[in-house]
């Protein structure tokens, strides 16, 4: 199929998905799953709607392998975050394409663009008579953005082990960075940090607010504890993916500080992303003090959003937090949730090579830059439950990286339709390389 046809088909499918309001909560992903099912059925691909909630199904489509090759899944979530903010240039669920080729709306980058182009890639391959050696699977999963209902990928990996794949491409990556020295790198997400939120409660003694010196107000104590968390310099750890990332940008010579400084000088994206990728981060966010203004409380609490690197345990974080908080003020720590995330995939696999080989044909000289994400995506479940080698990779070239990044969970989310054609080409190339 020529580029113009691919582009039209990918643009229509992405726009149609954007027009279905799948804001999560509540999700309501069924229309999106049905739309994708109809589209893939028409290409002669075997499809199935699966899930514990009929209103929130996952779509699974499969081109059966002829045997002897690895299986590969292309994944994408069908839900989006709400779009109630004012100030959109075009309404968020209109799926409007303007005269300059920009497609606007909620999900244009997160991630109906990726979901749609992966579906178009499989449909185009099926129509061309492509016979993969291993199964080529498409999964459009519900409930990624909120995930409290556990009806999406987290359900799927547990309930449907028969769908296990060797390799997968899911959300993330694809940012094309031009380094200061002129080299071009394109990010590929190979792992994610884990979240482990904690509540820090300063302990004191209640008293009347008219006599602050009597009793032991927990609020000033909490203020001091929060100051210490904010000022804490956590120990640095360089996991293999991040080591490779820093080496690729900065070269292997010198101390870690030298290499980080050189890497950061190469691109603002690197400068912003390296610090949280070499250490635990602890961000104090929600505060709870007294229930009445005239009562000095015995307890005052701050919730801290902690993100740890792959391999860091809750016990490690406990030690770091206690080191940050010091020993002279009374406090309690309460873990607010289990550790979620933190799975990584190996680099230098046949799937990694297939992604690089796409760049070799479409963006000559560009090199994959392996990264660990500070956020969360469903590939974590694939890595964790199935041992799947999963990457986040959706290369784009026309949409500036800043526009792409600014669109996430924000107003005026948009993607250039040239990138929809480019994304389809990338996925078709990767499927052919790996399973052809
Ligand atoms: Zn997303």
Image (spheres, grey):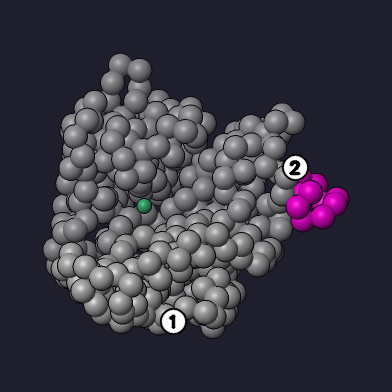
Residue 136 drawn in magenta: no
Q: Judge whether residue 252 can be spotted in this image.
A: yes
Say which quadrant the N terminus sits in. top left
Q: Nearer the viewer, mark 2 or mark 1?
A: 1
Q: Residue at x 52, y 56 (%)?
A: 373
Quarter residue 59 falls in: bottom left
Q: Which mark is residue 214?
A: none
- Few, some or many residues within 10 Å of mark 2 (<14, 14–19, 20+): some
- Kindly state the secondary structure of the residue where label 1 is placed: loop
- Answer with left or right where residue 26 lies relative to residue 375: left
Asked whether 423 or 44 is in front, the reply is 423
Residue 255 drawn in magenta: yes
Q: What residue sits right under mark 1 in the picture?
A: 330
Which of the marked residues, 2 or 1, is nearer the chain's N terminus?
A: 2
Q: Residue at x 20, y 51 (%)?
A: 23
Q: Which mark is residue 262?
A: 2
- Kindly state the secondary structure of the residue where label 2 is placed: helix
**372 shown above or below 120:** below
Say which quadrant the C terminus sits in. bottom right
Rendered location of residue 40, percent (x, y): 29, 50
**170 shown above or below 426:** below
Tell me if label 2 and label 1 are in contact, CB under 8 Å.
no
Rendered location of residue 30, percent (x, y): 17, 57
**41 shown above or below 323:** above
**102 shown above or below 291:** above
Q: Judge whether residue 432 can be spotted in this image.
A: no
- Answer with left or right where residue 94 lies relative to residue 181: left
Q: What span is in magenta?
A: 249-259
Q: Residue at x 30, y 32 (%)?
A: 412
């Amino acid at each position: 199929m020529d580029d113009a046809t691919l582009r039209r088909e990918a643009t229509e499918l992405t726009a149609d998905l954007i027009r279905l309001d799948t804001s999560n909560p509540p999700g309501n992903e069924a229309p999106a799953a049905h739309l994708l099912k109809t589209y893939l059925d028409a290409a002669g691909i075997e499809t199935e709607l699966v899930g514990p909630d009929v209103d929130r199904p996952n779509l699974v489509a499969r081109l059966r392998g002829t045997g002897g090759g690895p299986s590969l899944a292309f994944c994408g979530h069908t839900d989006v975050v709400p779009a109630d903010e004012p100030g959109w240039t075009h309404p968020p669920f209109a799926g409007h394409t303007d005269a300059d080729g920009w497609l606007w709306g909620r999900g244009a980058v997160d991630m109906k663009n990726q979901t749609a182009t992966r579906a178009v890639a499989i449909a185009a391959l099926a129509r061309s008579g492509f016979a993969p050696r291993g199964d080529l699977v498409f999964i459009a999963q519900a409930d990624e953005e909120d995930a409290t209902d556990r009806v999406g990928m987290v359900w799927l990996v547990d309930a449907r082990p028969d769908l296990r794949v060797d390799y997968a491409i899911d959300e993330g990556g694809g940012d094309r960075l031009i380094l200061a020295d002129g080299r071009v790198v394109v990010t590929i997400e190979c792992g994610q940090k884990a979240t482990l939120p904690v509540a820090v409660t300063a302990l004191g003694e209640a008293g009347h607010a008219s006599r602050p010196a009597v009793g032991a107000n927990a609020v000033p104590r909490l203020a001091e504890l929060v100051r210490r968390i904010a000022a804490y310099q956590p120990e640095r750890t360089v996991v293999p993916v991040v080591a490779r990332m820093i080496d690729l940008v900065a070269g292997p010579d010198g101390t870690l500080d030298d290499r980080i400084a050189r890497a950061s000088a190469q691109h603002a994206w690197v400068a912003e992303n390296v610090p949280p990728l070499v250490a635990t981060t602890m961000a104090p966010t929600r505060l709870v003090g007294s229930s009445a203004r005239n009562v000095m409380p015995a307890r005052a609490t701050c919730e801290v959003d902690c993100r740890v690197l792959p391999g860091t345990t809750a016990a490690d974080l406990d030690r770091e937090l206690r080191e940050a908080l010091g020993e002279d003020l009374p406090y309690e720590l309460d873990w607010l949730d289990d550790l979620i995330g933190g799975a990584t995939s190996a680099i230098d696999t046949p799937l990694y090579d297939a992604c690089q080989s796409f760049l070799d044909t479409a963006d000559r000289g560009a090199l994959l830059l392996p990264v660990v994400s500070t956020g969360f995506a469903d590939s974590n479940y694939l890595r964790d439950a199935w041992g799947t080698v999963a990457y986040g990779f959706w290369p784009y070239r026309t949409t500036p990286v800043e526009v792409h990044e600014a669109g996430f969970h924000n107003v005026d989310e948009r993607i250039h339709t040239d990138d929809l054609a480019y994304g389809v080409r990338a996925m078709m190339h990767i499927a052919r390389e790996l399973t052809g």
